[in-house]
Amino acid sequence: MNPSNGLNDSPSLDLPVLQRWFQSVITHPDGVEEGVAASEAIIPVAAEDLERIVTKSSRLGASERLAVYANAYHARLIECLGEVFPLVRRVVGDSGFADFVLDYLQDFPPQRYTLNVLGVHFPDYLAKVRPDRNTDGVPDWADFVIELARFEWEIFEVFDGPGIEKHPPFDFRSLREVPPDDWTTIHLLPSPCLRLLKYQFPINEFFSQARATDSDEEVVVPEAATSFVALTRHDFVVRRHSLSPFEFTALAALAVGNTLGDVLELNTVADHGQDGDSLADTIEGWFIRWGRERFFTGFTV
């Protein structure tokens, strides 16, 4: 064992035991002293006897040397989640975000060799610890933060998940070869990276506006307003698309396996009433957009 690492070379402690103890101590959410106490089953040592395990330096005692590693460990996790939830961090502030993360890590500490899944439960955690609403049923600031966290995690998962980069684009013009009477048998195949999302706030618009401002500029939480968003990914870039309620309804129905004919018969589509466009013009516009943005990979009959 290398004494320069600060660990005393004790014949009663082998390296795996020391490693498990060290990890347990520096990752404890309540600090080194609590970590030492909680790690008694690994190495029974009191805080005042730490130098039996960790040598002091000319300037730092054993507990202080361990604290350097503990602080760096938690700082790295806060930084990691801040990269996944940058706008949540801006909305709640650096200090508030750090407090949320440290509390979150008590229930959901890293369990894998990769930190890619560290934030998977963070939106649900925020929902769990949210304060009571002042007015029942009215979306408030906490609801916005929770929805923003869910949106940022969806974006992260789409970026990190399966994509369509190796698949040729689906040309919707090929549907013209299918007689309209057979559209009741057509199932469109959604891209593996397609996400269809509904929110109580204009999350996508806020996301675009906030990203266009300086990171240190204060952001204003918008008023509640139902919004619909589609996420896709191609060329390894996540694309965000605001949807009308009618387009969202159609896409959601197609994504769960309804036929094209079933969707065209939906009242919410037939009575769309958008800007005076005919239903045929609206559907054609959808098809052009869906093909360009790779919402679907093909169809089956």
Image (spheres, helix red, strand yellow):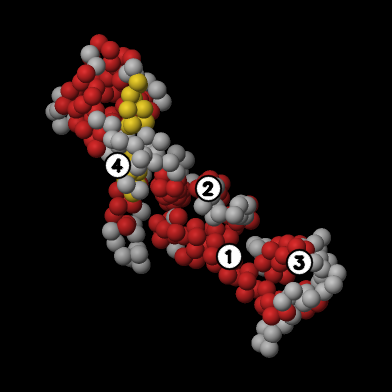
On the image, numbered disc 1 is attached to which residue? Answer: 74
Q: Residue furthest bottom?
A: 58
Residue at the (72%, 70%) spot, across then down: 33
Q: Amino acid at mark 2?
A: Val
In this image, 78 relative to 182: left or right?
right
Task: For residue 275, say whether it is visible.
Answer: yes
On the image, numbered disc 4 is attached to which residue? Answer: 241
Q: Amino acid at mark 4?
A: His
Question: Are there few (<14), some (14-19), or many (20+) residues within 10 Å of tag 2?
Answer: some
Task: For residue 140, say whether it is visible.
Answer: no
Instruction: Decide: is 280 above or below 136.
Output: above
x and y percentages locating residue 181 in the rendered image: 25, 11
In this rendered view, identify the residue nearer to me: 180 or 225.
Answer: 180
Q: Disc number at residue 120?
A: 2
Q: Quadrant of residue 41?
A: bottom right
On the image, numbered disc 3 is attached to which residue? Answer: 15
x and y percentages locating residue 284 in the rendered image: 19, 27
Instruction: Decide: is 15 above or below 180.
Output: below
Tag 2 and tag 4, C-beta contact below 8 Å:
no
Question: Are there few (<14), some (14-19), or many (20+) residues within 10 Å of tag 4?
Answer: some
x and y percentages locating residue 9 in the rendered image: 79, 76
Tag 3 and tag 4, C-beta contact below 8 Å:
no
Instruction: Decide: is 265 above or below 193.
Output: above
How far apart marks 3 and 2 lie (CA) works out to 33 Å
Q: Amino acid at mark 3?
A: Leu
In this rendered view, identify the residue nearer to me: 107 or 120.
Answer: 120
In this image, 19 relative to 286: left or right?
right
